[in-house]
């Protein structure tokens, strides 16, 4: 066996961090998309959906240029911290957040939009603040959608390749993810190693998805916490 | 699969070429198209990556590698005949940095990479790119490999290594002289020629692939490569020629 466990652990960490960040960032964004009446809202929705249609290499290319010392943002970061974000774990997290954004926000927004508005109105008439309504009415009623969004983000990041290839620099233990490891093995004609690693990734992702969808199968009736 | 070479059909040749050829071969291909009326379809990549594609049936007629090892491997596997192997150029390895970089190659030579301003050093992936192997050999030759290996970042091929430096994310990189001399890179950077005794010569070989579907066009293109006109272009891009080595 010649599995690169370091790459596996690194990829799982990346997927975990990105899922957590997108859960936090995705909730307010999805809330706004679901409930805003701004006439230009569709433009924001289109931007959020862009990573689905853009080739990951395009996204990775822009991220690389943005992080580099030739962009304003990159120069600012380098001035503050002394180094570029490219070729770092943080850099991969940033690229992956952009890459997986729609996979979190769209399921979140869809489940928010599906909530019976009368429940929200009732909560408001009972004097509950919008903040409390969000956490005690909207979120509990959207649990399946939230789980779907987080799981899709996790799985999407586990299998991410193009963005990592463009901004990672293939550093063992820092930016060499499983997909890069598999690609390297195939390029070097190490098919046996590529098979082993790919099979393990397949099994891992299947188990994660099966567990989550299995748990999510029973209709939930999580009432507002009292 | 019907493969016809009937007259009147579009004449093409499918060329897999090492990434260090990306600038030179665009010019060479355009000249060949103009003179011979045969369209040249170029696919660039790391030599190891292209070899792997050819092993899996990629529909190329010619393979221009950045070394001799990959063509020889394909020959031993029956993907090409050894009689077609021809050494068309010798590549050169350089250290490259953006023009506004504080690094001083003239003063420090290879030790430039130890400069405190250097946080990341870009190389091509030595697993499948000959220039990556040459860079590692040069680092080991100078005794710096252990010291700088935590700062190495690997591009998938030599073009990507150059891009890491050009975008300002790595401060210096081992790239092909052909990149440093490409028109689109001119004025953007400065380079230092890594001494030839620091790494095994980057002899570059071409083979005609056995399952080539455009054998006649491929042979014509190889003849064109051997011409004085192409020799001049290759030299302009920093390659030396086997005869003038």
Image: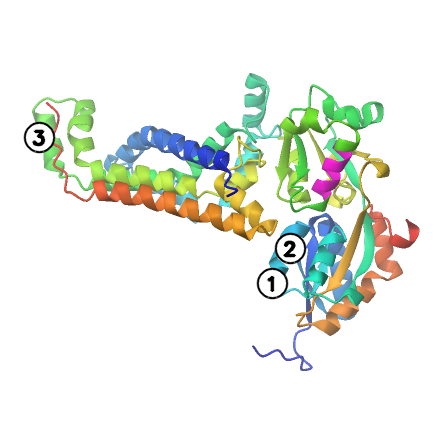
Q: Residue at x 69, y 19 (%)?
A: B116
Distance from disc 3 to disc 2, alpha carbons, whole Å, reads: 64 Å
Q: Say whether residue A110 is magenta.
A: no
Task: Give percent across and percent down for residue B50.
Answer: 64, 55
Determine contact: label 2, label 1, CB under 8 Å. Answer: yes
Task: Give percent across and percent down for residue B138.
Answer: 77, 35
Quarter of the view holding residue A133: top left
Say above or below: B89 vs B151: below
Q: Chain of mark 3?
A: A
Q: Chain of mark 1?
A: B
Residue B50's disc is 2
Q: Is residue A71 visible?
A: yes
Distance from disc 1 to disc 3, alpha carbons, whole Å, reads: 64 Å
Q: Chain of mark 2?
A: B
Answer few, some or many: residues within 10 Å of disc 1's Cα (few below 14, many 20 plus, some between 14 and 19). some
**Residue position for label 3:** A122
Quarter of the view holding residue B198: top right
Q: Residue at x 72, y 36 (%)?
A: B136
The residue nearer to you, when weighing B231 against A186, is A186
Q: On the rendered structure, is B165 left or right of B245?
A: left
Of tags 1 and 3, the one toward the viewer is 1
Question: Where does the magenta region start and end?
Answer: B131-139
Residue B58's disc is 1
């Amino acid at each position: 066996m010649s599995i690169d466990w370091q790459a596996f652990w690194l990829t799982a960490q990346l997927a975990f961090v990105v899922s957590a960040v997108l859960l936090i960032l995705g909730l307010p964004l999805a809330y706004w998309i679901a409930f805003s009446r701004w006439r230009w809202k569709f433009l924001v929705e289109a931007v959020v959906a862009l990573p689905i249609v853009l080739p990951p290499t395009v996204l990775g290319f822009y991220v690389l240029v943005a992080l580099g010392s030739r962009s304003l943002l990159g120069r600012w970061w380098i001035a503050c911290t002394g180094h570029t974000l490219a070729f770092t774990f943080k850099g991969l997290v940033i690229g992956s957040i952009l890459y997986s954004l729609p996979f979190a926000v769209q399921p979140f927004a869809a489940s928010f939009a599906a909530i019976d508005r009368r429940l929200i109105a009732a909560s408001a008439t009972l004097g509950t603040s919008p903040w409390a309504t969000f956490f005690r009415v909207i979120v509990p009623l959207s649990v399946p959608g939230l789980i779907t969004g987080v799981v899709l983000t996790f799985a999407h990041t586990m299998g991410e390749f193009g963005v990592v290839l463009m901004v990672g620099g293939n550093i063992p233990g820092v930016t060499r993810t499983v997909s890069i490891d598999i690609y390297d093995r195939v390029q070097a004609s190490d098919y046996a190693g590529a098979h082993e690693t790919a099979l393990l990734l397949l099994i891992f992702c299947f188990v994660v998805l099966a567990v989550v969808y299995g748990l999510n199968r029973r209709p939930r009736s999580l009432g507002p916490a009292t | 699969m019907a493969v016809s070479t009937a007259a009147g059909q579009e004449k093409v040749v499918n060329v897999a070429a090492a990434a260090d050829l990306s600038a030179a071969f665009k010019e060479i291909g355009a000249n060949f198209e103009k003179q011979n009326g045969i369209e040249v379809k170029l696919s660039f990549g790391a030599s190891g990556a292209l070899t792997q594609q050819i092993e899996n049936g990629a529909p190329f007629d010619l393979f221009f590698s950045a070394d001799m090892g990959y063509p020889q491997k394909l020959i031993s596997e029956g993907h090409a005949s050894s009689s077609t192997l021809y050494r068309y150029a010798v590549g050169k390895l350089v250290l490259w940095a953006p023009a506004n970089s504080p690094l001083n190659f003239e003063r420090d030579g290879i030790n430039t990479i130890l400069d405190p301003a250097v946080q990341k050093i870009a190389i091509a992936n030595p697993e499948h790119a000959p220039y990556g192997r040459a860079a590692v050999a040069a680092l080991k030759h100078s005794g710096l490999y252990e010291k700088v290996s935590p700062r190495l970042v690997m591009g998938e091929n030599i073009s990507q290594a150059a891009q890491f430096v050009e975008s300002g994310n790595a401060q210096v990189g081992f790239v092909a002289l052909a990149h440093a001399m490409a028109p689109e890179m001119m004025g953007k950077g400065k380079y230092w020629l890594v001494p030839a005794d620091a790494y095994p010569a980057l002899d570059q070989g071409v083979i005609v692939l056995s399952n080539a579907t455009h054998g006649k066009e491929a042979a014509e293109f190889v003849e064109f490569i051997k011409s004085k006109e192409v020799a001049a272009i290759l030299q302009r891009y920093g390659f030396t020629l086997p005869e003038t080595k």
